[in-house]
Amino acid sequence: MKESINFFEKVYEVAAQIPFGRVTSYGAIATYLGAARSARMVGWAMNASHNNNDIPAHRVVNRKGLLTGKHHFDGTNLMQQLLESEGVIIKENQIQNFETVFWDPSKELPIL
């Protein structure tokens, strides 16, 4: 379990750097951390982060831009509302212009 806590902390360090109005995916964070097959674990980390307002979990979506984690947020549409308040356009639970707002930590952050 200690390894997963360490992994969660690394996920939070990356997620905290996602810029306002941008999104990334669970898989992009996992790949950046050298654990490409751990996208689901990144999702678990995001789910566990909801009591920490410093972690913008609403900016992490699936690889297709779908708000798959929205049911983990309080309220019916909180994840969507948070993203829309940052200028991200969402239609039917999917981010529009996903390629434009996608933030890739492997391209934006220093190599680990």
Image (cartoon, rainbow, N blue to C red):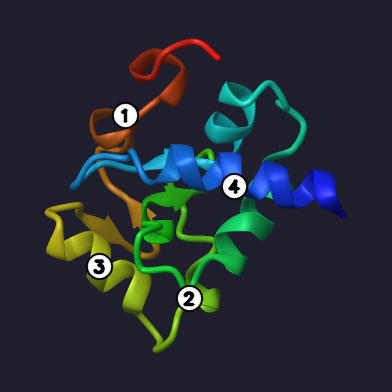
- Residue depth check, mark 2 versus mark 3: number of the one nearer the observer: 2
Mark 2 vs mark 1: in front:
2
Viewer-proximal residue among 30 and 1:
1
Q: Earlier in the sequence, mark 2 or mark 1?
A: 2
**Disc on the earlier residue, 3 or 4:** 4
Which of label 4 and label 1 is nearer to you? 4
Q: Residues within 10 Å of mark 1 (few under 14, many from 20)?
A: few
- Which residue position is annotated with label 2? 51
Residue at left offset 59%, top offset 66%: 47
Q: Are marks 3 and 1 in contact (CB under 8 Å)?
A: no
Find the distance from the CA under tag 2 to the CA under tag 4.
14 Å
Q: Secondary structure at mark 2?
A: loop
From the viewer's perspective, tell me whether residue 46 is left or right of residue 108.
right
- Residue at figure coordinates x 43%, y 86% from the top left: 74
Q: Are marks 2 and 1 in contact (CB under 8 Å)?
A: no
Looking at the image, tell me whether mark 3 or mark 1 is earlier in sequence order: 3
The three-letter code of the residue at mark 1 reads Glu
* Residue at left offset 62%, top offset 24%: 31
Q: Earlier in the sequence, mark 4 or mark 1?
A: 4
Task: Residue 112: give x, y in percent of width and height.
Answer: 55, 15
The residue tagged 4 is 9
Q: Is residue 53 above or below residue 107?
A: below
Alpha carbons under labels 2 and 1: distance apart: 29 Å
Report which residue position mark 1 lands on.
99
Give the CA distance from mark 3 to mark 1: 19 Å
71 horizontally vs 5: left or right: left
The answer to whether residue 12 is above or below residue 97 is below
Image-based side of 93 in relation to 62, left or right? left
Residue at the image point whose x is 45% and y is 50% from the top: 60
Q: Residue 32's x, y, as percent? A: 56, 23
